[in-house]
Image (cartoon, helix red, strand yellow):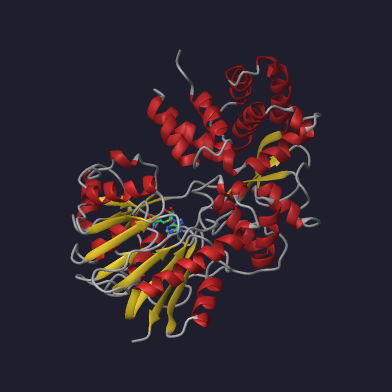
Amino acid sequence: MTITARQVAADVLHRSRARDGFASELVDDALATANLAPQDRRFVTQLVFGVTRRAGTLDALLKPFIHLPPHAVQPRVWDVLRLGAFQLTFLTHVPKHAAVNETVELAAHVGAERAKGFVNGVMRRIAELVTDDFTGAPGADAVPFEAGRPPPPAPLPEGGGVNARGAPSDTLEATEFRRSSSPFPSGRGAGGGGLPRYRKLTRPVLPDPHAAPGAYFAAAFSFPQWLANRWLERYGPDECTRLGFWFNAPPPLWIRVNKLRTSRESYRIQLAANLIEAGAGEHPQSLRFPEHHSIRDLPGYAAGDFAVQDHSSMLVASALGVQPGMRVLDLCAAPGGKTTHLAELMDNRGRITACDIDPKRLETVTSLCQRLGVPNVDTVLLKDDGAIPDGPGEPSQYDAALVDVPCSNTGVLGRRPEVRWRLKPNEFVHLVRLQTRLLIEALVRVRPGGAVVYSTCSIEPDENEGVVQSVCKGMRGVALEAEHRAVPGRPSDGGYWARLRKAK
Ligand SMILES: C[S@@+](CC[C@H](N)C(=O)[O-])C[C@H]1O[C@@H](n2cnc3c(N)ncnc32)[C@H](O)[C@@H]1O
């Protein structure tokens, strides 16, 4: 029997709830075995990522029509209801009757044949609730649909904003969060440039944005209440609206052109010959695709002409300022995106020790090195105690180190849709403790005069400036040389890096 895209999506959501892995890995696994046409494969991704990102909003829309205690609805039936509500609210290419009927059939697939009538009733109410009208203003009867289209970016000079080594200029914050205390904005600017679109409902179901901004932001933009409160206090409603739209949309695809193999311009010509459009980003190796592409189908994938890497991540290895011939420690290396970038910046000359505690993820460092043509990386599996090997020869003799620590991932919530629901506020204490320890260990391994770059894909100050400041304060002979906050959506993922230098 053939399996449908909706059935695959329902199965992935079930596995994701059981925390079987990241949604992206589970989708890849499922698509590897399901025999689906390309447009159905894209539909699976759209459903799984969309439902996971928007789960909070979908539940707010569903709850008024479910007169049962939440535990009385089986989790898999709840997944089915979210899948149906997502199609009716956030997709415009699925006809309403198809969304309702297919969702009812899905109940049987998840082993809840007897729930078909219930699912049918709820879906019909959602179909009545969601109108085909859009507005530019938030409200209790308007669901955030999409950000306004930003104005086209001004053309960038080649390598603009970066120095000769490809390192970003050492200013703190090339871009900055905008703090505002205005009520939730409407109109131009709220979504990052153009007019945002909110989908009108026939009646108010969401909290009122003016009377209850915290509850509104959590429900309308689908964030856990604790995170909504945290961000509203820090950024204000205007910036939260922009972040909400950004994190609920699919993030753009960026690649890093492998300068060991080709140049950005030559690769762009290769893309153009295949009628594929890509725009140059500020980092001299970066290209951004305006449209979705299957990575393995892009020209030069097997030959290692590029690695998939977000623009913000490319800035991190560049910030270390490595030179050919150096001995470099990469303390949290897997899956190897930044390790291989370091090798490219070193022109494959010198040695990189790439450590991680996860053996499976460490294997991906090796395979990425092979694909990209990087021979000078030694992978090291760290033991449970996290003990790090000394550099070649004497201890503490690495010329430079990168410590790209495990973090909350709050800068990449669009790419990691399940993170917002898995992350708990009490995790920050443990993360900060680990991050501080790793940064100190990297500093200990580097020679006098050497540099360490500390980085995260978090936008939480306690994981970023907080860790760096406390280490600089507590460790003699260590100075903060430069730091950079990447703001989500300007132009890519959120994150942070700081370069520290040991006194000579
Ligand atoms: C943000 S990821 C690194 C991404 C990588 N630098 C890249 O660019 O592809 C963090 C990594 O830290 C690893 N990790 C977690 N705890 C660690 C520890 N105590 N020591 C070293 N690595 C650790 C995780 O397994 C994970 O691979």
Q: Quadrant of residue 17?
A: top right
On the picture, is 419 further left or further right than 39? Answer: right
Q: Nearer the viewer, residue 335 or 162?
A: 335
State the count of labels: 0
**Is 159 located above or below residue 488 in the figure?**
below
| Residue 38 visible within the image | no
Where's residue 86, x and y in %?
61, 35
Residue 189 in the image: x percent, y percent? 59, 61
Residue situated in front as seen by the camera: 284 or 447: 447
Q: Residue at x 53, y 31 (%)?
A: 93
Point 24% across, 56% down: residue = 258
The quarter of the displayed image where residue 295 is located: top left
Name the residue at 69% across, 41% down: 200
Quadrant location, ligand no. 1? bottom left
Position in image of residue 317 (x %, y %):
34, 65
In the rendered image, is residue 275 in sight?
yes
Q: Furthest-top residue in view?
A: 1
Work out whether 449 lies above or below 332: below
Q: Which of 110/232 is in front?
A: 110
Q: Position of residue 411 (x, y in %)?
A: 52, 58
Q: Write the residue at 52% across / 32% down.
A: 12
Assign the C terminus to one quadrant of the image: bottom left
| Quarter of the image with the N terminus in it | top left
